[in-house]
């Protein structure tokens, strides 16, 4: 029997968190789904954990890649074998609220939208508690996201809070198949952003639920802090790939917005690399960098304070 929803879970050396992710699927109030764990050549017990779940529940399947090949390849492998009317994703270190699939299915069945998503809670790894949501302001209702508003909600800069590119899409599989939509497989940045932008280009809009039913575990560090020249090329390639999604003359305003964003991304990455190579001397060469860095420091400090507040109840419970 064809499931209503296919959940694709790419996993690479995810033994530490995968059980929690799979347990959250088993606790869904919707039962008509399949879970596809894609082992991307893990060297730990990731596959063992996934296969144990599959033995205990026929809705779970395990497939693999000739990996490690990266998250884009792993997600595409899952899409190859997905059978559901709808497809969504779960990273191996994250988890769902019990009603996530039910909420998205209910919203999907009440509209003609082919692309939906939900809000997220960010989880501090130090205490395992939610400390902020991806989209603040209101916990109920929906918002309609156009391509233009999606781009505006994905700013670039130091200390900038994550944008809507993090949203895990809930998309009708027919849309993916009709337009050949897949993740970019070359190692790059923001594969999620590019895939979601491609879906938006074909669906026209994203129906975003304000309720936060996806739990996103944040880890320390940023790949932008360790950029190599090859990474820099990949970042620039992202802009080219984004523009290719909007070739029609009537897409001119969107192309202009993408070109402006590509310039900001290039400038931001160049400044990141300059800081890494020259330290504070880079700010003497590029005065504009000073304001951007100071603004980022302020934003990062504010975020750190909010994290500390989230941890505070745990500390008090421990008598600290």
Image (cartoon, rainbow, N blue to C red):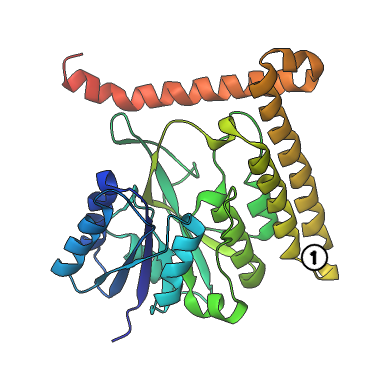
Along the line of sight, the residue nearer the viewer: 91 or 131: 91
Q: How many marks?
A: 1
Coordinates of residue 87 in the picture (x, y in percent):
43, 70
Q: Quadrant of the C terminus?
A: top left
Along the line of sight, the residue nearer the viewer: 164 or 10: 10
Along the line of sight, the residue nearer the viewer: 66 or 224: 66
Name the element at disc 1.
helix
Residue 107, visible in the rendered structure: no
Along the line of sight, the residue nearer the viewer: 210 or 230: 230
Q: Residue at x 34, y 48 (%)?
A: 94
Coordinates of residue 36 in the picture (x, y in percent):
33, 67
Q: Residue at x 42, y 79 (%)?
A: 85
Q: Residue at x 83, y 69 (%)?
A: 250
| Quarter holding residue 285 | top right
Image: 254 above or below 283? below
Image: 309 above or below 216? above
Q: Residue furthest left?
A: 56
Residue 58, visible in the rendered structure: yes
Q: Which residue is mark 1?
A: 251
Coordinates of residue 283 in the picture (x, y in percent):
74, 16
Image: 210 above or below 246? above
Label 1 crowd bin: few (<14), some (14–19), many (20+), radius 10 Å: few
Answer with left or right where residue 221 lies relative to residue 45.
Answer: right
Coordinates of residue 7 in the picture (x, y in percent):
36, 66
Image: 140 above or below 30? above
């Amino acid at each position: 029997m064809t499931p209503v929803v296919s959940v694709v879970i790419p996993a690479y050396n995810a033994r530490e968190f995968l059980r929690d992710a799979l347990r959250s699927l088993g606790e869904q109030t919707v039962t008509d789904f399949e879970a596809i764990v894609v082992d991307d050549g893990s060297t730990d017990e990731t596959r063992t954990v996934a296969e144990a779940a599959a033995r205990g529940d026929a809705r779970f399947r395990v497939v693999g890649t000739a990996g490690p090949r990266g998250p884009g390849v792993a997600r595409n492998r899952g899409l190859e074998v997905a059978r559901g009317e709808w497809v969504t994703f779960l990273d191996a270190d994250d988890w769902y609220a019990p009603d996530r699939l039910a909420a998205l299915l209910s919203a999907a069945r009440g509209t003609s939208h082919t692309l939906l998503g939900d809000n997220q809670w960010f989880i501090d790894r130090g205490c395992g508690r939610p400390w902020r949501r991806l989209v603040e302001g209101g916990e109920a209702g929906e918002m309609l996201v156009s391509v233009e508003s999606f781009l505006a909600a994905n700013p670039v800069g130091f200390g900038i809070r994550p944008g809507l590119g993090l949203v895990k899409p809930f998309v009708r599989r027919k849309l993916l198949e009709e337009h050949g939509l897949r993740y970019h497989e070359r190692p790059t940045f923001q594969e999620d952003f590019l895939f979601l932008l491609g879906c938006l280009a074909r669906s026209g809009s994203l129906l975003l639920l304000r309720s936060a039913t996806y739990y996103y575990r944040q880890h320390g560090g940023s790949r932008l802090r360790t950029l190599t020249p090859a990474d820099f090329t990949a970042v620039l390639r992202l802009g080219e790939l984004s523009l290719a999604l909007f070739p029609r003359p009537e897409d001119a305003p969107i192309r202009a917005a993408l070109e402006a964003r590509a310039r900001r991304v290039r400038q931001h990455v160049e400044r990141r690399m300059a800081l890494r190579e020259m330290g504070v001397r880079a700010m003497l060469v590029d005065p504009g960098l000073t304001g951007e860095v100071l603004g980022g420091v302020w934003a990062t400090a504010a975020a750190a304070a909010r994290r500390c507040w989230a941890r505070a109840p745990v500390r008090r419970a421990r008598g600290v």
